Image (cartoon, rainbow, N blue to C red):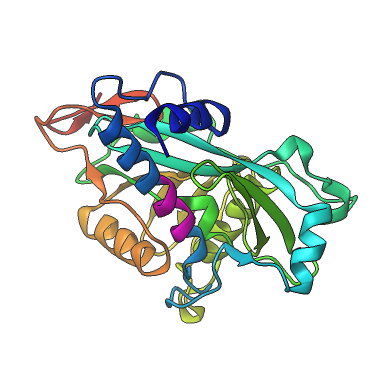
Amino acid sequence: MTCRSYWHLLQQCMIPNGRNTLSESNPRRAEVLQVAAKEAEINGLLGPQVHSDGTPGGSPCLVELFPGDPRYELALKIATRCRMLLDLKRSNMYKVRMVVQGFLLNRVAVDGADFLYSSSVARMSTVRGMLLQPRRGEKVFATIDISQAFLQSIEFTEEEQRYVKVFDPVTGKMRYFLQLRPLYGEPSAPVRWESTLASFLTAPESEGGLGFVRGSNDRSVYYHPVRKFAVLVYVDDIGVLALREDCKWFFSALAKRFKVKEPVYAEDGAPPLDYLGLSVAARGSYLY
């Protein structure tokens, strides 16, 4: 495939996210990196996720279907189309994300007529209230991100499974998949992720959970009645204000259940960390 034809396919099928991500200075290198990023995304979706108990080897997000499979014939008729979103990260590496075109989804057929799509995120007044609480003592503030959170949601039941398709700009063919877990762009993905995380945080420690109590006024706040600290959840960004040993306990337990990024602490004298658009800095016994 020539660079020119690949460039044209990318413009049609792999939509740059917010800015021109195609390298005009070295189109051949850009082509190789873009193809690799696309394959990495699909292979990741086809690979096993973790079980609900945190052990590896769980069901993947997608199962690719091929002619001859009865499910393939059904997918030809009812599969929802996806798009490939292409972006260039600050590390100068390309990233591709396969997203469902949610507005095309038959919601009643896949989720049911009475499915509740509303999900909760921490209110900014709650965030400020936690960060600026008096008599903080030796508590530190830290954050952690869940990697590709929606893809780590509990898998669909057999009745909830659905079909998706995506145009492959390299082969020029449509690929069809059985979908076993939520994908980005899916209308139900936020609330399914919220339910997955909440069930883990609130389950008793004797049952493999963390023993938090969920807030009633703000459903994105979780308080641990024994360790005496709270966490705030904003989709996949979690903020913690607790003693350092409690932070380490929480992050370690979270990493055993989900794929997470490295936690970031607001250290005394260090540059401010970004949390939900707020710059949070630790200076002595104060947070700013």
Let me know if residue 27 is in the magenta part. no
- Image coordinates of residue 6 in percent, x first then y, are 45, 33
Q: Quadrant of the rendered structure where residue 104 is?
A: top right
Circle count:
0
Q: Main secondary structure of the magenta part?
A: helix
Residue 7 position (above or below residue 167): above
Image x and y of residue 27, in percent = 30, 28
Furthest residue in direction front, as rendered: 2
Q: Is residue 123 above or below residue 237?
A: above
Which quadrant, please, contains the C terminus? top left
Q: Residue at x 28, y 43 (%)?
A: 142
| Quarter of image, res 175 | bottom right
Report the front residue among 76 and 51. 76
> Looking at the picture, does residue 53 appear above or below residue 188?
below
Left or right of 110 on screen, residue 214 = left
Q: Is residue 234 visible?
A: no
Relative side of 280 to 213, left or right: left
- Whether 40 is among the magenta residues is yes
Question: Residue 102: where, in percent of width, then height?
Answer: 71, 39
Q: Identify which residue is drawn at 11% across, 34% down.
A: 268
Q: Which residues are magenta?
A: 38-44
